[in-house]
Amino acid sequence: MAEAAAQQGLSHRVAAASARDDANNAGVASRDPGPGSRKTGGRRGLRSLAAAVSLPSALVALSFFLAGSSPTAATTVAIVRAGSVASEAVLAVAAWMAWAEGGLHARPAATLLPYAARLCAALAWAPLVLGHGAARAGLACCAAMAAAAVACARGFGAVNPVAGDLAKPAVAWAVLLAVVNYKML
């Protein structure tokens, strides 16, 4: 062993430690799944993230476009539409992070239900306020969005602190949307 180590330029101590590690790990399966499975897992995770973010964001954008708007407040509606879609996208990333940690299955009442309630309220806001002119019902939707976003921040934060922090801008957006909605009264 010493002669082989000398030929490779290794000291005797390094060669002996390497031999001990080889003997200890003999018959033990490696935790490294290999380069092929890492790429597959990463692609699957990226696909699930893309689906988790694009589906709710597209639904919110679609609700705005189908609701229509009055031409007098076109600038306000454009800002509200962009902010609502962005807020939904950030909350979807937070939900995906909680899902990736197993939190949506382990704690559905604290994570999945508030997220679904927030999404339903966000989908209902544009048709109510912009389509039917029901500003008071829009305020109720904003209150539901804010309450559900707070519950999401708490539930996601218990699973993954970063996901909980990502859910907090949705609370701020719901309050800002309520202010804009109040101005529409």
Image (cartoon, rainbow, N blue to C red):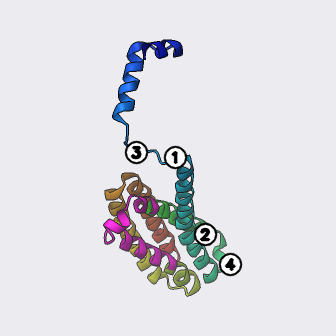
User: How far, Cα to Cα, is label 2 from label 3?
Assistant: 60 Å
In this view of the protein, which residue sits in the foreground, 27 or 145? 27
Look at label 4 and name its amino acid.
Pro
Q: Quickly name the residue at label 3.
A: 29
What is the chief secondary structure element of the magenta stretch? helix
Residue 153 x %, y %: 37, 61
Tell me, for residue 76, which label it has, or none: 2
User: How far, Cα to Cα, is label 1 from label 3?
Assistant: 12 Å
User: How far, Cα to Cα, is label 4 from label 2?
Assistant: 10 Å
What is the span of residues highlighted in magenta in the rendered image? Answer: 96-123
User: How far, Cα to Cα, is label 4 from label 3?
Assistant: 66 Å
Dot 3: what SS?
Answer: loop
Residue 14 x %, y %: 41, 18
Look at label 1 and name its amino acid.
Gly
Tell me, for residue 58, which label it has, or none: none
Q: Reading the chain from its start, which is encountered first: label 2 or label 1?
A: 1
Q: Quickly name the residue at label 4.
A: 71
Q: Residue at x 49, y 64 (%)?
A: 92
Circle 1 crowding by C-alpha within 10 Å: few under 14, some 14–19, many from 20: few
Look at label 2 and name its amino acid.
Thr
* Residues at discs 1 and 3 in contact (Cβ within 8 Å): no
* Residues at discs 4 and 1 in contact (Cβ within 8 Å): no
In this view of the protein, which residue sits in the foreground, 124 or 131? 124
User: How far, Cα to Cα, is label 2 from label 1?
Assistant: 52 Å
Marks 4 and 1: which is nearer the front? Answer: 1
